[in-house]
Image (cartoon, rainbow, N blue to C red):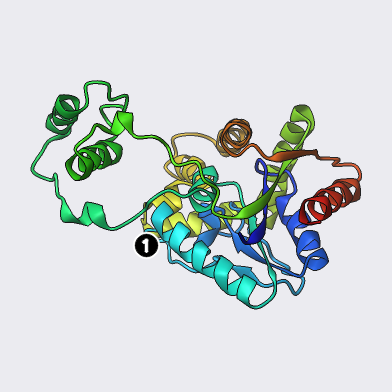
Amino acid sequence: MEKIIVIIGPTASGKTKLSLEIAKEFNGEIINADSTQMYRGLDVATAKIKDLEGIVHHLIDNKDIEEDYTVYDFKKDASFLIEDIIKRGKTPIIVGGTGLYINALLYDYNFDDIDKKYSFDHLSLEELYEEVLLKDPFNKIHKNNRRRLERSLIYYLENNEPFSSKKEDIYLKYDATIICLIPNREELYNYINNRVDSMVSLGLIEEAKKIYDTKIRTKAVMTPIGYKELFEYFDNNISLEEALDNIRRNTRHYAKRQLTWFKNKLKPIMIDVDYNDFNKTIEEAKRTIKKAFS
């Protein structure tokens, strides 16, 4: 089983800085697992890395904002990259904060094209939900989540058993050392607040206005925290300070959700973040990985 390194953690926890040092130490190439950094032109709000420091990075700036990029796409692309990096004698390092992407990549879930055989466009959302309940009375999918309802029905049609009875695949595909950065919550929130101010000085408002003027409102644009909040300001619905406060608040909430996901879904090795001396965090991560690789 191939050895890989995975670096996760909430936004603003230092993943980028750590990943560069780990890549240098372990002859690695970095595969981005942040869904918002895949897109060209989304730079400041997504805290996209500027100086690669000579480290090869993959899946950054590889899509236009009009394009869709799914979990299935990421799993396929990242799996190919992992094999290629290993064949070249280097270490794949997965870095990012999109838990669903990382979960799908590491575990042996079956993402295939079978759902393309089916179409439920003729069913309203209510009719689709009722159809799922007929096939699966123990269904727990929310009645407004059309995508999951459709996949539940497809599963039944393909396997002749309700989706709720399906056992989750829990087999790790790789020998993965999963490092999760755990900041002190108060320090993290202060760091997030200050980072928003830094983003403004780096051109966040100008970047958001440029995207706003395109009138493009795809998932790529509306998912990152920063743009939709500023769009409200550009629409004259709120003040600039209210928009920035909303960015700070939403980022804090997102960081909290990320930590909960990582702890519950991935069972990582947790490393405390020392914002005052991040080198200590880096050295602890190196020791942990060396021990896992030995």
Q: Amino acid at mark 1?
A: Glu
Q: Provide residue 249's location: percent of width, then percent of height.
A: 60, 31
Relative to 27, say whether 164 is above or below: above
Classify 238 as above or below 210. Answer: above
Is residue 142 at least partly visible in the picture?
Answer: yes
In the image, 239 versus 183, the foreground residue is 183
Q: Quadrant of the C terminus?
A: bottom right
Specify whether residue 70 is in view.
no
Q: Nearer the viewer, residue 65 or 290?
A: 290
Q: Nearer the viewer, residue 133 or 231?
A: 133
Q: Nearer the viewer, residue 237 or 85?
A: 85
> Quarter-wise, where is residue 63 in the image?
bottom left
Seen at 46% across and 43% down, the residue is: 228
Graded by Cα atoms within 10 Å as few (under 14), some (14 to 19) or many (20 or more), the crowding at tag 1 reads few
> Residue 28, how many percent across, how many down?
72, 67
Whether residue 133 sits left or right of residue 206 in the image: it is: left
- Where does the image place residue 34, in percent across and percent down from the top left? 56, 53
In which quarter of the view is residue 137 placed?
top left
Q: Quadrant of residue 21?
A: bottom right
Residue lying farthest to the bottom in this orientation: 88
Q: Residue at x 73, y 68 (%)?
A: 51
Q: Is residue 115 left or right of residue 23?
A: left
Q: Quadrant of the N terminus?
A: bottom right
The reply, left or right, for residue 151 in relation to residue 268 is left
Give the vertical position of 196 relative to 30 (above or below). above
The percent coordinates of residue 208 (x first, y second) are 52, 53
In the displayed structure image, the side of residue 222 where residue 240 appears, left or right: right
Q: Secondary structure at mark 1?
A: loop
Is residue 271 shown above or below 209?
above
Q: Which residue is mark 1?
A: 66
